[in-house]
Amino acid sequence: MPTIMPADDHSLKTLKLEAFDLAGSPALRSKLETSEALSELDGSELLHLASLLKVYQVPAGTQIFKEGDSAAYMGMVLDGRLIVSKRNEEAAGKPLYSMAAGKVFGEMAMLDGEPRSATVMAAVDSTIAVLSRDNFEKLCDSRPIIALKLLRRIGRLLSQRLRRVSGLLVDYLP
């Protein structure tokens, strides 16, 4: 039975941002090594993954995507700072945290195909690298070891986040 995925994510296209490849920027390519999601990859694996990524310069104040949007990619902050916010009961966005270079975003929605769980905005001029779901699927087919390492690392990151939030929520339980 085929997996049903949501409609394509057009958030980057609607922002009218120019994509460029990492091949033309050794300085940005070296920043991939600091990404928390890529720490298990060796040099040749990073180079292969870099060939599947698109890079975007995002001006300060730009909303990259909003909570509830369709999702078809995950991103990594190469430079700058992003703010993640979530709607509350009054539908107002509340900032949850700030992420700097090396952090990943959008990994949950890329993996589970569900709509975005939060809104992400550039707090300052930022550079992000994006792995589309299509390119992730290509990676799974062509280089499954790299995909496995990436998935294993993302799983650890999500587990760490869940443990941290569970620790924070325990004080609110009756």
Image: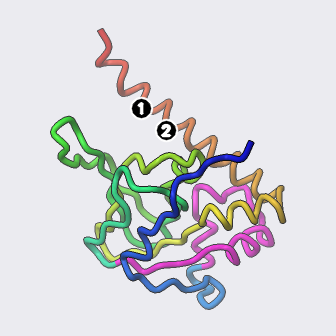
Residue 170 located within the stretch drawn in magenta: no
Q: Position of residue 91 (x, y in %)?
A: 19, 43
> Does dot 1 land on a helix, a strand or a loop?
helix
Q: Residue at x 46, y 86 (%)?
A: 18
* Residue at the extreme top: 174
Farthest residue to the bottom: give it: 24
Q: Say above or below: 141 vs 97.
A: below
Q: Residue at x 57, y 77 (%)?
A: 54
Q: Which mark is residue 165?
A: 1
Label 2, label 1: how many angstroms apart (C-alpha)? 6 Å
Mark 2, residue position: 161
Between 159 and 54, the residue placed more toward the observer is 54
At label 1, counting other C-alpha atoms closer than 10 Å, the crowd grade (few under 14, some 14-19, many 20 or more) is few
Residues at circles 2 and 1 in contact by the CB criterion of under 8 Å: yes
x 57%, y 36%: residue: 159
- What's under tag 2, amino acid-wise? Arg
Q: Residues within 10 Å of mark 2 (few under 14, many from 20)?
A: few
Disc 1 marks a residue whose amino acid type is Val
Q: Nearer the viewer, residue 78 or 133?
A: 133
> Which image quarter holds the C terminus?
top left
Q: Per the image, is 38 magenta?
A: yes
**Going by the image, does 62 lie left or right of 52?**
left
Q: Which residues are magenta?
A: 29-58
Give the quarter of the image for residue 133: bottom right
